[in-house]
Image: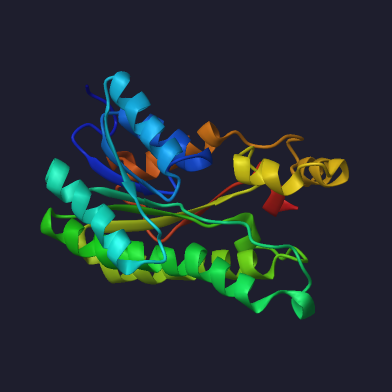
């Protein structure tokens, strides 16, 4: 199999559904060997089998991104199975509760920060040494438009995603001379299980999400995956430290 990621080895966190799953399929189609890291065992294993049946290379690894040992294991699995690490897509995340700051539960805030920000730090921490061994690589972090603009009720998610943007820039500068590129994407409203779950049974909220997008619709996961593919490939070899909104025009308003 040849393609834009031919010969590359990638780890994707949050790979069992939504943007992660769409990216895993696309990476495999483009020639990458992919390690799928997630806490959703059944969905992750099914996706790995789907990719293999289609002729790709994939392996599922259970991974709670708040655990340094489990993140390290996902990275080590890629190196053990495929010999190196070229790409990390830090993508695992949760939405968290919706509540004003005075009533936002502390335990929920801690959980969102731990998964959506610390998990990315751990991915960077363990991926960078392996990429240095093979001469470089590309790391893509999933931020969000909520890391760029404020949305009431989303203190945990917004703080975490804003932190991802800052973390991306620090990592990019630290790694720029070492052959490792670090970039972030900032999706708007995407038609994923997490999004559908957050608006289920609330028609007004569903409509409000669509109305936030000047293009008049939600993004499909595959549209986000296409940008991740570009940033993972050698086509983006002179790009690092960048934040790419992929939001249908949301943040231009």
For the view shown, which residue lies furthest in the top direction? 54
Picture quadrant where residue 248 is located: top right
**Closer to the camera, 122 or 140?**
122
For the view shown, which residue lies furthest in the right direction? 204
Instruction: Look at the picture and state if 31 lies above or below 236.
Output: above
Q: Residue at x 22, y 23 (%)?
A: 2
Q: Residue at x 36, y 58 (%)?
A: 182
Picture quadrant where residue 24 is located: top left
Q: Position of residue 139 (x, y in %)?
A: 34, 54
Counting labels gives 0
The colour scheme is: rainbow
Q: Is residue 189 visible?
A: no
Q: Position of residue 184 (x, y in %)?
A: 46, 55
Q: Residue at x 48, y 70 (%)?
A: 166
Left or right: residue 10 versus residue 150 is left
For the view shown, which residue lies furthest in the front direction? 42
Instruction: Look at the picture and state if 241 lies above or below 223.
Output: below
**Closer to the camera, 3 or 72?**
72
Q: Position of residue 81 (x, y in %)?
A: 15, 42
**Closer to the camera, 2 or 111?**
111
Left or right: residue 139 versus residue 242 is left
Left or right: residue 203 versus residue 115 is right
The quarter of the picture where the N terminus appears is top left
Q: Is residue 135 visible?
A: yes
Q: Residue at x 45, y 45 (%)?
A: 40
Q: Position of residue 224 (x, y in %)?
A: 52, 39
């Amino acid at each position: 199999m040849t393609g834009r990621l031919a010969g590359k080895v990638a780890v994707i966190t949050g790979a069992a559904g939504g943007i992660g799953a769409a990216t895993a399929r696309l990476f495999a189609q483009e020639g990458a060997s992919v390690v799928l890291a997630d806490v959703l065992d059944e969905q992750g294993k099914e996706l790995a089998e789907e990719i293999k049946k289609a002729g790709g290379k994939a392996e599922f690894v259970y991974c709670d991104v708040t655990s340094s040992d489990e993140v390290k294991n996902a990275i080590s699995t890629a190196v053990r199975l495929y010999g190196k690490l070229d790409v990390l897509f830090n993508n695992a995340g949760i939405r968290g509760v919706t509540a004003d700051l005075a009533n936002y539960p502390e335990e929920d805030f801690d959980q969102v920060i731990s998964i959506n920000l610390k998990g990315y730090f751990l991915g960077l921490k363990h991926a960078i040494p392996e990429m240095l061994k093979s001469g470089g690589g590309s790391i893509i972090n999933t931020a969000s438009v909520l890391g760029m603009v404020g949305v009431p009720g989303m203190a945990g998610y917004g703080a975490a995603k804003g932190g991802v943007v800052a973390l991306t820039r620090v990592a990019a500068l630290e790694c720029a001379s070492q052959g490792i590129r670090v970039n972030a994407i900032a999706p708007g409203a995407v038609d994923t299980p997490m999004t559908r779950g957050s608006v289920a049974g609330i028609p007004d909220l569903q409509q409000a999400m669509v109305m936030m997008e000047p293009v008049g619709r939600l993004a499909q996961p595959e549209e986000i995956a296409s940008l991740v593919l570009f940033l993972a490939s050698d086509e983006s070899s002179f790009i690092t430290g960048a934040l790419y909104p992929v939001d249908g025009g949301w943040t231009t308003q």
